[in-house]
Amino acid sequence: MNSIFVYCELEGVQVSPVSQELLTKGRSLANQLGVKLEAIAIGSNLDGIEKQILPYGVDVLHVFDDKALAPYTTAPHSAILVKLFQEEQPQIALMGATVIGRDLGPRVSSALGSGLTADCTNLEIGEYEDKKSGQVYENLLYQIRPAFGGNIIATIVNPDHRPQMATVRQGVMKNEILKADYKGEIVMHKVSDYISQADLAVSVIERHMQKPSHHLDSASIVVAGGYGMGSREGFDMLFKLADVLHAEVGASRAAVDAGFVDHDRQIGQTGLTVRPKLYIACGISGQIQHIAGMRESSLIMSINQDPDAPINAIADYVVTGRVEDVIPKMIRNLKEISK
Amino acid sequence: MDKFNIIVLAKQVPDTRQVGKDAMNADGTINRAALPAVFNPEDLNALEQALAIKDRYPGSTVTMLTMGPERAKEIVMEGVFRGADGGYLLTDRLFAGADTLATSYALSTAIRKIGKFDIIIGGRQAIDGDTAQVGPQVAEKLGLNQITYVEEILDMDSKSVTVKRVITGGVETVKAPLPCLLTVNGSAAPCRPRNARLLMGRKNYEVPAWTVADVNADPTKCGLSGSPTKVKKIENIVFQAKESKRYGADEKEIAALIEELAVNHIIG
């Protein structure tokens, strides 16, 4: 049976968290189907890269190591994947729903004429009956994703074309090493067999990486503000609350769109997915597209002057009042108990 | 002086940002009638980049291209009112039900028919699907280089374009040969409003409508039959309502709330 392939996104020579999550998921899907898990690493100076990848239970690692392959540009990476997939005929191919995965995935799927489902939040194996032809397909990949602004959940299948391709969001799947000394095969490919000079026409002239301004994805407490915070100054109050709680500050799309806070703090369907121990939603009404990014928090607190705000329905603690009244009192009481 | 022929890809979408209680039918399907149809927001950012090129390089042209039902010609008109030269609507029942691959195939056939272009610009993604797939797939079908997540066009000459794009954790400057395809982020410059003179002067512009036959498309590659992905199931999202503890905003209640969190080791 044909393998499952995972494209490992590299940050320098570090495998990105979303790729580790996909290797974890890929391993469990491969077990379920009784097939091999194969991984692809494309970059430069990849000596020893297998140490980061094989422990996830990878049976075959395909390495493409060449100066021209980093930093990432679309054409050489997609040329490699297209040819490799034509040779290896994977049944499933997965990549992260990141800037790179969302640039690369559609390009490869278009070249192969295979379907691609973007931004999945879950993957399962199951059967599918084509209502028109009556044909039943076994062991298809269910590509499950929120759609329509996060208002519905769609299960997509790709019955007739291979590979079944999906990009998957970071932070929605587990990240677990299978076995530190898992034995897998390493295949070093000759890069010049896969790319041509024409694939190198786009050049990265300059790159400027910023230190991350927050650690929302790993915070154990998140204080998030919505449109109800009213202003950038309103968010200053949230930063103070976050400070005493050792928390990170997030926001709803409405607050980001209103310019109260930077875009990179947006939580929800089109932003980050977080799952902290405590999520404090301040002045957030609770549109489904926001809830999609925080519903798996262990505990949810809502502070809202509307006692019927939709988010209150999923909150463990509901404080009914104006945020500008409630939050300073919380800060004062928190300082009190930490004395 | 350099001149460029620019094609803008734009989509009319239901405004999923305005989803209210009546947006979903009882059976879990979407009540499209309850949602206004709008110009996909990031496609407006794309249009602005195109119009800015036209400002900078007089004699350049901007051509709108959209696919959808008859009323989607509003998208072309909106582009014209903001400064585009004209555009086309791809409309045919055979195009209906297309996934991203069939959509990009259809758009690529129309672009071949338009023929002359130096640069194609679209929004990064549409708010009804949020897939970001159509831009790269159109580029692949036309054999063009692509640059996605573009924030700003920094420079152009007769042979190349240089852009700033946003990547995970930073920004990069990328140079690509022309012709190529760009997709533009919502954080890029907002689109200029309608121009009053154009609103008067171009209001009778007839948007040419093209069918599958007009663009010489293979009907088996269009619409539902050209779509490898199938929707198995759509579910309405139902959240499990919780039994929540309720507090008021006065000093005593907030103190009790903080006490509760501390006692249960949720904080501290």
Image: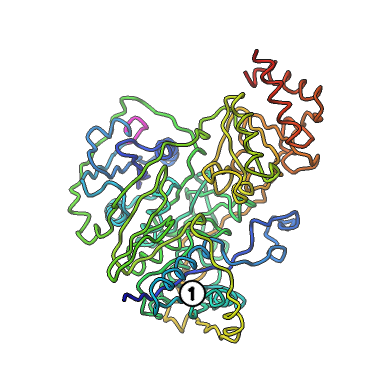
Q: What count of labels does the image hold?
A: 1
Instruction: Provide the chain ID for the residue under circle 1.
Output: B
Residue A147 position in % (x across, y down): 58, 54
| Residue A175 visible in the current orientation | yes
Three-letter amino acid code at the position of disc 1: Leu
Q: Is residue A57 magenta?
A: yes
In the rendered view, would you say A214 is above or below B11?
A: above
- Colour treatment of the image: rainbow
Badge 1: how crowded within 10 Å, few (<14), some, or many (20+)? many
Residue A184 position in % (x across, y down): 28, 33
Residue A162 position in % (x across, y down): 39, 56
Q: Is residue A339 magenta?
A: no
In the rendered view, would you say B262 is above or below B153?
A: above
Q: Quadrant of residue B78?
A: bottom right
Considering every residue shown, the one lying at the far top of the view is A339
Q: Which residue is mark 1?
A: B65
Residue at image point 68% right, 25% down: A331
**Tag 1, which secondary structure?**
strand
Magenta stretch, main secondary structure class: helix
In the rendered view, would you say A237 is above or below A163?
A: above
Range shown magenta = A54-58
Q: Quadrant of residue B157?
A: bottom left
Q: Which sits in the foreground, A215 or B163? A: B163
Q: Which sits in the foreground, A309 or B33? A: A309
Q: Quadrant of residue B206?
A: bottom right
Residue at image point 63% right, 63% down: B14
Left or right: where B245 falls relative to A337: right
